[in-house]
Image: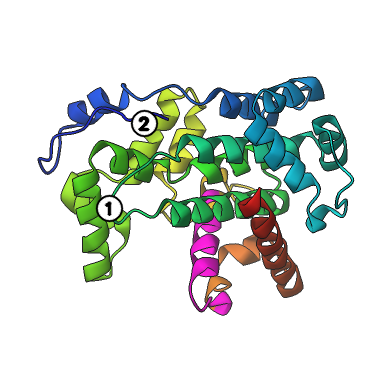
Amino acid sequence: MSAVQALPTARHLEPAAWARCIVSLPSMPSAFSAAVRLLGNDNASAASCISAIERDQALTVRVLRLANSPFYGAQGQVSRIGDAVQMLGLRTVASALAAVSLRTALGSLRCSGFHLANYWRHTLCTAIAARELAQLASQDVGEAFLLGLLHDVGKVILAMTSPELETQALQLASAQGIELHDAEQQLFGVTHAEVGAVVARQWNFPAHFAQAIADHHRPPAATAHGGLSLVGLVHLANDMAHHLEAPTPDIEALWQAPVWSALQCSEPQRRALIARIDDELQIMSSA
C-alpha cells in the first residue's frame, strides 16, 4: 500500500475532504483479493490458492512456516504449498494468505506514536477471535476472519493521510484515558470506524462488511433467533482482543458480557476458546 494524498490539518474536516482522500487509495493488494475470493467461495479450487501464494516468495515461506509449526503437528514435514493446503485446509491457508498480504501492504506506515506491531497483533487477535466466535454463533467463519482483519483499517488510513492529527488523537486518548475513537471524533470529526467503512465500500466489500466495521465499537445485539449477529460478533472479538492484550488480562471481566449466555457457551468452553485463540495467535504472528 503506497502513500496516499495528505489531508489538511483543519479540525472537523468536511466529509467531501475525506471522500477526496479516500478515493485516492490504492487498490486492495492482489494477494489479499485472492484470499478474499477463496474465503467467500465454498467451491474455490485449491489451485487458485496455491498459485496466489507461489507467485510471492515471502508468502510461500510464511505459509510453509505456518504449516510446519508445532500447532499443526507436522514439524519439518511440509515442503510444498500444495501439501500445506491439503494438510491445513483451503480456508486456513487462505486466512493466512489474507493476513500476511495485508500485513505486508501496511508495512510502510509511518506515524509518530502509532505502533504498527501493536496494531497488527491486535488485528490478528481480533480476526482469530472472530473466526472462533463465528463457529459458536453459526456465522460464516471466512467473513468473520476478514472482518477481524479489516475492523481497524480506518486507523491506518487516518495515520497515513493525516499523521499529525492521528498522533494528537493518540496523545489525547492517553492523556484523558478515553477511547481512541472518541479522541478522533474530537479532533477529526470522524472516527476510524467510519473511515474504515468507507474504505470497505471502496474495496467493493458487501454492504454488511462496511456496517460491521462502522459499528464495531457498539455493544453487540442478539439476532432474532437469540444468537449473535455478525456486527455483534466483531464487537465481541475486538473486546476479547483488548482484554487478552492487557498487561494483566482480566478474563473474569470479559465473561460479564450478557452475550455469552446468548451463545450458550459454558465456562470450560470459554476457557478452551481463549486457549485456542492464544495458541493460534502465537503461530500466526510468526508466520
Amino acid type, mark 1: Ser
| Circle nearer the viewer, 1 or 2 | 1
Q: Nearer the viewer, residue 250 or 52?
A: 52
Label 1, secondary structure: give it: loop
| Residue at disc 2, secondary structure | helix
Decide if residue 89 is on the left or right side of residue 148.
right
Residue 273: image x %, image y %?
Answer: 71, 63
Q: Is residue 268 left or right of residue 204?
A: right
Residue wearing tag 1: 112
The picture places residue 239, in percent across and down from the top left corner, at 50, 61
Which residue lies most toward the left here?
10
- On-image quarter of the N terminus: top left
Front residue of 279 and 234: 279
Say which quarter of the image contains residue 176. bottom left
Q: Amino acid at mark 2?
A: Val
Q: Is residue 252 left or right of residue 136?
A: left
Which one is nearer the viewer's eye here, 196 or 282?
282
Q: Is residue 24 above or below residue 61?
A: above
At horizontal 36% and vertical 31% (from top left) the residue drawn is 198
Residue 198's disc number? 2
Residue 263: name its quadrant. Answer: bottom right
N-terminal label among 1 and 2: 1
Local packing at callout 1 (Cα closer than 10 Å; few below 14, some 14-19, many 20+) is few
Q: In percent of the image, x 79 and y 57: which residue is there? A: 71
* Bounds of the magenta segment: 234-252
Q: CA distance from mark 1 to mark 2?
A: 24 Å
Residue situated in front as seen by the camera: 264 or 243: 243
What colouring method underlies this structural image?
Answer: rainbow
Marks 1 & 2, CB-CB < 8 Å contact:
no
Residue 149 - label? none
Q: Residue at x 18, y 53 (%)?
A: 186
